[in-house]
Amino acid sequence: MVRVGLTPERLTLAGAELADEAGFGEVTLSALARRFGVKPASLYAHVKNSHDLKTRIALFALEELADRVADAVAGRAGKDALTAFANAYRDYARAHPGRYEAARYRLDPQTAAASAGVRHAQMTRAILRGYELAEPDQTHAVRMLGSVFHGYASLEAAGGFDHTDIAAQQSWAWTLDCLDTALRSRSAS
Amino acid sequence: MVRVGLTPERLTLAGAELADEAGFGEVTLSALARRFGVKPASLYAHVKNSHDLKTRIALFALEELADRVADAVAGRAGKDALTAFANAYRDYARAHPGRYEAARYRLDPQTAAASAGVRHAQMTRAILRGYELAEPDQTHAVRMLGSVFHGYASLEAAGGFDHTDIAAQQSWAWTLDCLDTALRSRSAS
DNA sequence: CTGTTTGCCTATAAGGCATAGGTAGATGCA
DNA sequence: TGCATCTACCTATGCCTTATAGGCAAACAG
């Protein structure tokens, strides 16, 4: 009986890696146990159950994502901040598809309220400071930006942009340009 | 042994209903068999396997969605068409969350090419006729619209807009207004 | 170096997917 | 009307994943 040194943290990280390799849907206690050369039942000493494991991976991914976005927008404003935010977001989704999927795992309200998702939302509001939008326009804009970013990452990951030769990168730049124009035109009203 | 009269069509429809009630992830052969008062093994005479069932539900949902959108945009142009398209899309996602989820089920390329998803894409291009965009701008716009619509429906379904008091309906109208402005500003260049 | 903690184990059970092979109800044809 | 065939649904079985209960030995504290 060799002790492998399992901890909730190691399981979470390994689960995140597994998600990136095979998809978040393939993250099972059995698969994770195989990865560690251990029996599935052994994992229950470190995580409560399958849902608990997935929640931990989701929180981990949200934290990572918020960190990257925070790093990207630091010291930037206006369109510069918008682009940096958007790129950090999309880059994360592309580099870590499984973790990005995990970040969208449905959390119960209190867990969500204590997650890095809150920080993420605050940063979205922060980049809008450059556009001087009053409420309720600011909330509308937060929702629109969230929709575009998530929608684009989601469709791109699903291969929805593979049919046409035009590079996804170009459409992304075009879209950000569009959003900047639209937001600036709203800052007047 | 009472014959219930199973057919692939009835299974697909029942699966779609089950998806709307409990989520697409809960659509299993076992659950569907229970719904018909039949043993799981009996379903294999009508659908190849679980993946086949899900694919059928996905194709069914794509068909329904394309029908509604086609109905909405018929005889409309410009912002009117854009709004009608967007509302038909969002309304479907809200009325049939499980089917909407199913419509995003990953299909293999040939199945996707023969699905109503193609019709859907064509209609997106059609509503852009009113904005007179040349390629590659048109493709960029198709991708942006797809991202916003899917992103908004997805975030709304996940309860992402429940934290703030401002109604999701208002943000939706604001977003469509924004998109119209942005697209019109591009039609010049 | 001994006692306690705890990390990983085996055993077990329920539920989902899937296949093989059997039986009875429906259908076709005389 | 009666028989043969077809086929819709069945039981039996096996594997996989989740989950719980209880056991043993490695690691650690004193």
Image (spheres, coloured by chain):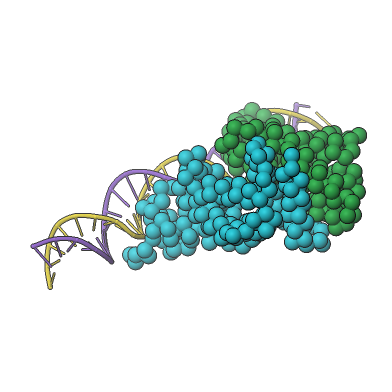
Chain colours: A green, B cyan, C purple, D yellow
Name the residue rendered at 72%, 44% in the picture: B187
Q: In the figure, is residue A74 to the left or right of B47?
A: right
Q: In the figure, is residue A4 to the left or right of B59?
A: right
Q: Position of residue B125 (x, y in %)?
A: 61, 47
- How many marks are shown on the rendered structure? 0
For residue A123, above or below residue A87: below
Specify the quadrant that holds the C terminus of chain A.
Answer: bottom right
Q: Position of residue A155 (x, y in %)?
A: 64, 42
Specify the quadrant that holds the N terminus of chain A.
Answer: top right
Depth check, front residue: C24 or B7: B7
Q: Position of residue B12 (x, y in %)?
A: 46, 57
Residue A16 seen in the current view: no
Quarter of image, res B106 = top right
Residue B119 seen in the current view: yes
Depth check, front residue: B182 or A64: B182
Depth check, front residue: B12 or A43: B12
Name the residue rendered at 80%, 47% in the picture: A182
For residue A127, above or below residue A113: above
For residue A66, above or below residue B62: above
Name the residue rendered at 81%, 35% in the picture: A84
Name the residue rendered at 70%, 33% in the picture: A170
Q: Position of residue A79 (x, y in %)?
A: 84, 38
Q: In the figure, is residue A164 to the left or right of D13?
A: right
Quarter of image, res B66 = bottom right
Depth check, front residue: A136 or B104: A136
